[in-house]
Image (spheres, rainbow, N blue to C red):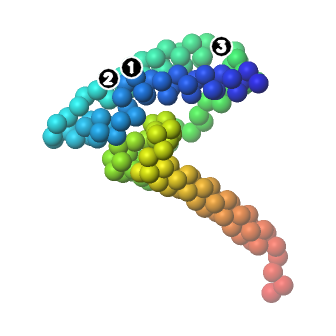
Amino acid sequence: MPAILASFVCGLIFSAGLLISGMNQPAKVLGFLDIFGAWDATLAFVMAGAVAVSAIGFALARRRAAPLFATKFSWPERRDIDAPLVAGAILFGVGWGLIGLCPGPALVNLAGLRLPIMVFVAAMVLGMLGYELWQRRGVANSAAQSSLAATPSDG
């Protein structure tokens, strides 16, 4: 239960930060992406502040033997850049540039019940479900091919 409460509080702080900084406003984000027009550097300052706070948090967390609400840390194990990562980054960037929102602010904006936001979140969820289905099919196909390769043929 403490982990759920901690997650809720972190989400609340994150969404409050989005609201206070104005990053839930698509026009503000699109202004940041318009580097050759009326560029709004606000998002750069928000990102710099977030990176600074996160760096301090990660430095403190790495000093601990174990996390507060789990038995062990779940640090990323991979550091390589591969095709799925690049494709995901491109899709994320295109979606961000088209509507001016990334997933966090989109979820915060659901409270306004505006149709474009609801369509964006629905498309985001469908994309995540589609990816999950694609991954499962790939794993299932790999397992089936492995078992076929392992079975001796009657020749």
Asked which secondary structure carries label 1, the reply is helix
From the viewer's perspective, is the residue at label 3 or at label 1 nearer?
1
Reply above or below: 140 against 75: below
Q: Position of residue 54 (x, y in %)?
A: 48, 20
Asked which secondary structure carries label 3, the reply is loop
- Tell me: 116 left or right of 29: right
Q: Position of residue 155 (x, y in %)?
A: 80, 87
Instruction: Point out which mark residue 64 bears.
Output: 3
Q: Read off the residue under disc 1.
A: 49
CA–CA distance in space, label 2 to label 1: 6 Å
Q: Quadrant of residue 1?
A: top right
Any part of residue 78 in sight: yes
Which residue is the extreme one toward the bottom?
155
Reply above or below: 144 against 117: below
Any part of residue 84 in sight: no
Give the amino acid type for the residue marked by disc 1 in the picture.
Gly
Q: CB of mark 2 within 8 Å of CB of mark 1?
A: yes
Give the amino acid type for the residue marked by disc 2 in the picture.
Phe
Within 10 Å of disc 1 (Cα), the crowding (few <14, some 14-19, many 20+) is few
Reply above or below: 72 against 65: below
For image coordinates 16% across by 41% down, the residue present is: 36
- Tell me: 13 left or right of 94: right
CA–CA distance in space, label 3 to label 1: 23 Å
CA–CA distance in space, label 2 to label 3: 29 Å
Within 10 Å of disc 3 (Cα), the crowding (few <14, some 14-19, many 20+) is few
Q: Position of residue 38 (x, y in %)?
A: 17, 36
Which residue is the extreme one toward the left?
37
Q: Nearer the viewer, residue 48 or 153?
A: 48
Q: Read off the residue under disc 2.
A: 45
